[in-house]
Image: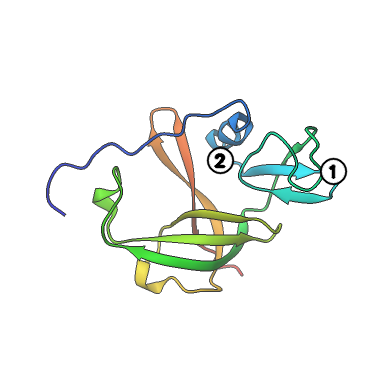
């Protein structure tokens, strides 16, 4: 694609999401766990979706899952101009939550529904690390 690529957006953590982004800087995937409901939840929220409680725990997860659905993007959003085409997928983590993320380290046309993936990390700024997924060749 011609032209100048814009800078990729960097997450701005809120009080609720800060533990998630701090763990990402350490290349650890953590998500919230509601002990009362015995359920995981993602994206970060102030209260448990099932219990309404505020005492959620942040727990590290495997980062492994499978592609639930995906699309191959040819017209990029700002900051992704130099990445087209790229695969954007809904990933079902083994822990039972869905995450929306890029699938990298594979040709976009090779991504498939049901494909096993694992979390990987992209540095997108001086102090920002973002999650993505890549094929899990050990599954």
- Report which residue position mark 1 lands on: 35
Image point 79% across, 40% down: which residue? 52
* Quarter placement of the N terminus: bottom left
- Name the residue at 56% across, 73% down: 114
Q: Residue at x 64, y 47 (%)?
A: 42
Instruction: Give the quadrant of residue 78.
Output: top left
Q: Quadrant of residue 102?
A: bottom left
Q: At which x and y percent is residue 33?
A: 76, 44
Residue occupying the far right of the picture: 36
Residue 105: percent from left, percent from top? 40, 60
Q: State which quarter of the image contains the C terminus.
A: bottom right
Q: Nearer the observer, disc 2 or disc 1?
A: 1
- Going 55% across and 63% down the picture, which residue do you hit? 117
- Secondary structure beneath label 2: loop
Residue 11: image x %, image y %? 46, 34
The color scheme shown is rainbow
Helix, strand or loop at label 1? It is loop
Residue located beneath label 2 in the image: 27
């Amino acid at each position: 694609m011609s032209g100048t690529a814009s800078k990729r957006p960097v997450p701005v953590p809120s009080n609720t999401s800060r533990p998630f982004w701090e763990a990402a800087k350490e290349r650890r995937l953590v998500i919230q766990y509601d002990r009362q409901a015995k359920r995981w939840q993602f994206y970060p929220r102030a209260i448990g979706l099932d219990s309404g409680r505020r005492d959620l725990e942040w727990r590290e997860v495997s980062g492994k899952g499978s592609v639930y659905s995906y699309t191959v993007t040819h017209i990029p959003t700002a900051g992704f101009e130099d990445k087209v085409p790229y695969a954007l997928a809904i990933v079902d983590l083994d822990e039972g939550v869905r995450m929306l993320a890029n699938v990298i380290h594979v040709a976009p046309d090779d991504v498939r529904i049901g494909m096993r993936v694992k979390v990987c990390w992209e540095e997108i700024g001086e102090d920002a690390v973002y999650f993505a997924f890549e094929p899990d060749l050990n599954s």
